[in-house]
Image (cartoon, rainbow, N blue to C red):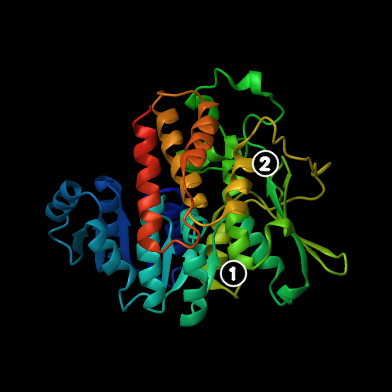
């Protein structure tokens, strides 16, 4: 029986991972973690009976300990708790469904401990890909992508020689504001941006999709995951979210992975790779599909993508600053403290303010994040 530990079990990816566990019945959940969601984590503990649970906030962890005193689950808190979860001898795979740079240390620790990683935490590769990928190769650890776009590419490359990749084509839905121009976005509210047309995702990722920051982060991830240059990655808009991404090979052949927009598919593929299993849910009916549209992203209006590519081209600590600035800006937007278009301005200002560290170690990455965040907090 496969044994997994989940970082971020109460979020969108975490809860859908547990759906996959329920549907299959042959995965043991040995550990769960959350930030402060006591109620949901308690329900998950009672259903899946993990050996360890971690709540990052100490007061929440104390409350959880009292609530589940009748179970055999151990409760820990803070980064020490996450690191113990990540390195548990009982776990085969660590599912990194946690949001933010808090996921980097546990992921590195899990790789050091020889765990395969089902990766849904974008920040890990965006900011520390130069540390993660060499360490995974050294330890013989698999990095199994959970993002739908990277999973699609991963599936297209199964059995193929990666040296024959000519181009990766990452698809975007275009988000809820596709087709609008800058003037149309001036008075956008959080509730408008949270209405994604196709996917059910967490709040932060949904905003990132609306700004096209998400696609920029995915370009950075793909660069590290698949060992290609930035020039070999192209973003295209596919509004129906039927094509999840494509690979063009040196002979001109293009492979695409298609399917209904259901995150359980890439999650299940990562957990059982290379095996495929039945997954209940809606199937594509090609007799009902009248067309599949492909568009060029509007990078004049949606500046998240070109800003991300600029950060990736500069490299070093700049992707960390891009990510940290976006994370803080999205939080301010969701709190109604700034406007939607201010997200781009904040990212650009933070990048322009930063002095790049060419080859940052972990401490320098975390320091760059802190400095960018504090710089923004001093202005907004």
Judged left or right of residue 108, residue 55 is left
Between residues 357 and 219, which one lies in front from this camera angle?
357
Q: Which mark is residue 305?
A: none
Q: Residue at x 83, y 42 (%)?
A: 291
Q: Residue at x 32, y 77 (%)?
A: 90
Give the answer, above or below, for where 235 lies relative to 248: above
Residue 353: x and y in percent read 47, 39
Q: Which mark is residue 173?
A: 2
First in sequence, mark 2 or 1: give its number: 2
Furthest-right residue in view? Answer: 251
Label 2 neighbourhood size at 10 Å, few (<14), some (14-19), many (20+)? many
Q: Residue at x 62, y 46 (%)?
A: 310
Secondary structure under tag 2 reads: loop
Furthest-front residue in view? Answer: 355
Between residues 64 and 320, which one lies in front from this camera angle?
320
Q: Nearer the viewer, mark 2 or mark 1?
A: 2
Give the answer, above or below, for where 211 lies relative to 337: below
Between residues 82 and 148, which one lies in front from this camera angle?
82
Residue 163: x and y in percent read 74, 75
Q: Quadrant of the N terminus?
A: bottom left
Residue 23 in sight = no
Residue 166: x and y in percent read 79, 65
Q: Quadrant of the C terminus?
A: top left
Secondary structure under tag 1 reads: loop
């Amino acid at each position: 029986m496969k044994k997994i530990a989940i970082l971020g079990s109460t979020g969108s990816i975490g809860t859908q991972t547990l759906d996959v566990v329920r549907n299959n019945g042959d995965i043991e959940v040995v550990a769960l973690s959350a930030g402060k969601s006591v109620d949901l984590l308690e329900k998950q503990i009672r259903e899946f009976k993990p050996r360890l649970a971690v709540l990052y906030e100490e007061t929440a962890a104390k409350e959880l300990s009292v609530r589940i005193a009748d179970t055999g689950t151990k409760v820990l808190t803070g980064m020490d708790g996450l690191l113990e979860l990540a390195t548990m001898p009982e776990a085969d795979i660590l599912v990194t469904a946690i949001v933010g740079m808090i996921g980097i240390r546990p992921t590195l620790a899990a790789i050091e401990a020889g765990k395969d990683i089902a990766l849904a935490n974008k920040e890990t590769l965006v900011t520390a890909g130069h540390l993660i990928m060499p360490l995974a190769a050294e330890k013989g650890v698999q990095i199994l992508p959970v993002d739908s776009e990277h999973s699609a590419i991963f599936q297209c490359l199964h059995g193929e020689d990666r040296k024959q990749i000519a181009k990766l084509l990452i698809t975007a839905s275009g988000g809820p504001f596709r087709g609008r121009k800058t003037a149309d976005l001036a008075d956008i509210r959080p509730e408008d941006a949270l209405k994604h047309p196709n996917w059910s995702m967490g709040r932060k990722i949904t905003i990132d999709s609306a700004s096209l920051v998400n696609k920029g982060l995915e370009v950075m991830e793909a660069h590290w995951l698949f060992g290609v240059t930035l020039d070999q990655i192209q973003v295209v808009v596919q509004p129906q979210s039927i094509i999840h991404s494509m690979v063009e090979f040196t002979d001109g052949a293009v492979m695409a992975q298609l399917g209904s927009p259901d995150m359980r598919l890439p999650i299940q593929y990562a957990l059982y790779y290379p095996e495929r299993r039945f997954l209940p849910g809606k199937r594509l009916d090609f007799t009902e599909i009248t067309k599949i549209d492909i568009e060029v992203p509007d990078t004049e209006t949606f500046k998240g993508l070109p800003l991300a590519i600029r950060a990736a081209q500069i490299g070093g600590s700049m992707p960390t600053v891009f990510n940290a600035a976006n994370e803080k800006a999205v939080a301010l937007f969701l709190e109604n403290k700034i406007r939607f278009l201010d997200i781009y301005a904040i990212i650009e200002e933070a990048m322009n303010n930063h002095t790049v560290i060419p080859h940052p170690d972990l401490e320098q990455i975390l320091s760059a994040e802190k400095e960018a965040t504090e710089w923004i907090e001093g202005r907004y």
